[in-house]
Amino acid sequence: MFAAARAAAGRGSDELPGATVADVLAEARRRYGAAFADVLANSRVWVNGEPATDAMIVTSDDEVAVLPPVSGGADLRPLPELRARRDELQAIDDAVSYVRRVAQGRADLARDAMHRYSDDGDPTPVYIRPDLESGLRDVLSDRLLGGGDRPPRPAEDFSDHPLSAELDALCAEHGFSRLDVLDYDELETLVARLDAFEQHVSAQRREVFAELDSVTDEIAEHYRTGGASA
């Protein structure tokens, strides 16, 4: 919960029961009262960083975010606090985006290695390509030179970030450094684990974007209400 929703509820997050978004929001209204219900009526609701509907199914792994429209200068956090949080969120996004790209690249390399085999139902797939050189060139050129979804930002080396360490541990466990000797089943397992990791990291990135949108709205409101000037 952000901004006015957080203020009305008296907390920024909670765990609530419910099989759908509507169930979760109904419990939130019951738990936090009329002031929260009034804020919720005019808020955007997202699940895992994406716009949600009341009928959407949710599980214990999902995050429902309440993003109120920012209005009324008295509800706004101080501008220095907002700017500091915005910078923090942008730094988090830089790190998460880096790890996501590395995970995607490694999954693509493992997927490319699977092309060495012809899987025609035979329990022992047939080896059809002797090396990874051309695949390595194609995958890396696509990942490094392909267009992104936003302009690049100056970034640090995030290889020592906890998510990087988690990715490295996963790769070590499943033999990523031995792509040229893994059999078809081992490569298939590695690809599945890397894809699942990338999806997990992407969900974190969407959550960062959701909060960044809310913080940006609050900053903009400071300018609209005269609390700050260009």
Image: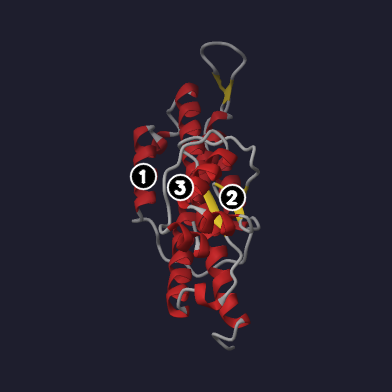
Position in image of residue 113 (x %, y %):
53, 33
- Does the image show residue 63? no
Q: How crowded is mark 2: few (under 14 residues within 10 Å), some or many (20 or more)?
A: some
Compare marks 2 and 1 and give the one earlier in the sequence: 2
Towards the viewer: 64 or 6:
6
Q: Which residue is pictured at 45% across the width and 47% down the height?
A: 31
Using the numbered discs, state the Cα–Cα distance from disc 2 to disc 3 in whole angstroms: 20 Å
State the quadrant of the C terminus.
bottom right
Query: Which image quadrant for residue 134?
Result: top right
Using the numbered discs, state the Cα–Cα distance from disc 2 to disc 1 in whole angstroms: 27 Å
Numbered disc 3: secondary structure: helix
Residue position marked by numbered label 1 in the rendering:
166
Towards the viewer: 196 or 81:
81
198 left or right of 169? right
Q: Residues within 10 Å of mark 1 (few under 14, many from 20)?
A: some
Q: Which residue is pictured at 46% across the width and 74% down the height?
A: 77
Position in image of residue 90 (x %, y %):
49, 66
Q: Is residue 11 above or below residue 17?
A: below
Residue position marked by numbered label 3 in the rendering:
31
Q: Which residue is pictured at 59% across the width and 29% down the height?
A: 115
Position in image of residue 9 (x %, y %):
45, 57
Q: Of the residues tagged 3 and 1, which is closer to the observer?
A: 3
Render colour scheme = secondary structure
Position in image of residue 224 (x %, y %):
63, 81
Compare marks 2 and 3 and give the one earlier in the sequence: 3
Towards the viewer: 194 or 113:
194
